[in-house]
Image (cartoon, rainbow, N blue to C red):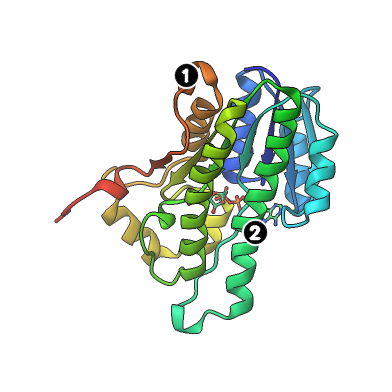
Amino acid sequence: MDGIVAISGGASGIGLATAEAALAAGASVAIADRDPAALARATMTLDGPRTTTRMLDVTHEDAVLAWMEQLEGVRGCVTSAGMSGVTPALETPAAQFRQILDVNVTGSFLVAQAAARRMVAAGQGGSIVLIASVSGLSGMKDRVAYSASKAAVINLAAAMAVDLAPHGIRVNAVCPGPVETPMVRQLHDNATRAAWHARVPLARYAQPEEIAQVVLFLLDPARSGYLTGQPIPVDGGFSTAGLMP
Ligand SMILES: NC(=O)c1ccc[n+]([C@@H]2O[C@H](COP(=O)([O-])OP(=O)(O)OC[C@H]3O[C@@H](n4cnc5c(N)ncnc54)[C@H](O)[C@@H]3O)[C@@H](O)[C@H]2O)c1
């Protein structure tokens, strides 16, 4: 793969696995994250001349623009920075709702927009992959803000795909089911894990590398050049499963 892949939330989980997969495919990677400890660990893991790392918060427009401005040759962008919250609808504070939408929706938009501007300026097209979730395809218990934010991310991909198509830029949304990452290890108790196992036909969580390989496919114009604007569930069959006695 040519050029740089810029990855927000690249210090952990799906973003980190995507960085590793992109490096293995020959790309350079630029990862950004707000967690200094995770970023330090990722810097060790991804060490090499084709990796740059940067600490930033995706909700800070100026920081996102400054990060993208110093990257030459951005051909791919992955927005994996995200946060969740588990609170019943009746008890979700407005501040929590706003924060989750700010990080997941506004943050994804700012990173994708800044990357798209670099791609347009370079005149070579590119591919943007927004990490959404199966939570954006249906209602998830106790996750009003998260579900709403991921539904917005899915439509953000569709709308950006239309605007950016004339520039040769494709935009898609990946919708993972449950994935073994630090976020999930923190949020999923045994009952939640059992519920997922019962509802996912493949009866297991994904590994981050399995999501990364789909992201890589979407980044590569040789393999997915006619694919844009789509939500792609990578969920062990969850979103299409019917009755599972
Ligand atoms: N793990 C799952 O089961 C799952 C399922 C569906 C979707 N997702 C989505 O995948 C994405 C990655 O999640 P993950 O499971 O790899 O989690 P993770 O916690 O391992 O990684 C997310 C990274 O994003 C960073 N981040 C969070 N807010 C940020 C901000 N404002 N600015 C910059 N960086 C920020 C975190 O520091 C972290 O390093 C998220 O958008 C998440 O919603 C995860």
Is the CB of mark 1 within 8 Å of ligand 1? no
**Does the Cβ of the disc 2 residue fall within 8 Å of ligand 1?**
yes
Quadrant in which residue 101 is drawn = bottom right
> Residue 157: percent from the left, percent from the top?
52, 44
Q: Amino acid at mark 2?
A: Val
Residue that badge 1 annotates: 223
Q: Secondary structure at mark 1?
A: helix
Residue with the mark numbered 2: 103
Going 77% across and 37% down the picture, which residue do you hit? 43
Callouts 1 and 2 close, C-beta under 8 Å: no
| Image position of 133 with respect to 145: above or below | above
Is residue 142 shown left or right of residue 131? Answer: left
**Please, what is the three-letter code of the amino acid marked with disc 1?**
Arg
Kindly identify the residue that appears in the image at 69 percent across and 45 percent down. 111
Closer to the camera in the image, 39 or 138: 138
Please tell me whether residue 92 is drawn above or below residue 41 in the rendered image: below
- Write the residue at 80% across / 33% down: 52
Residue in the foreground of this view, choosing between 1 and 179? 1
For the C terminus, give its image quadrant. Answer: bottom left
Q: Position of residue 159 (x, y in %)?
A: 52, 45
Q: Position of residue 27 (x, y in %)?
A: 67, 21
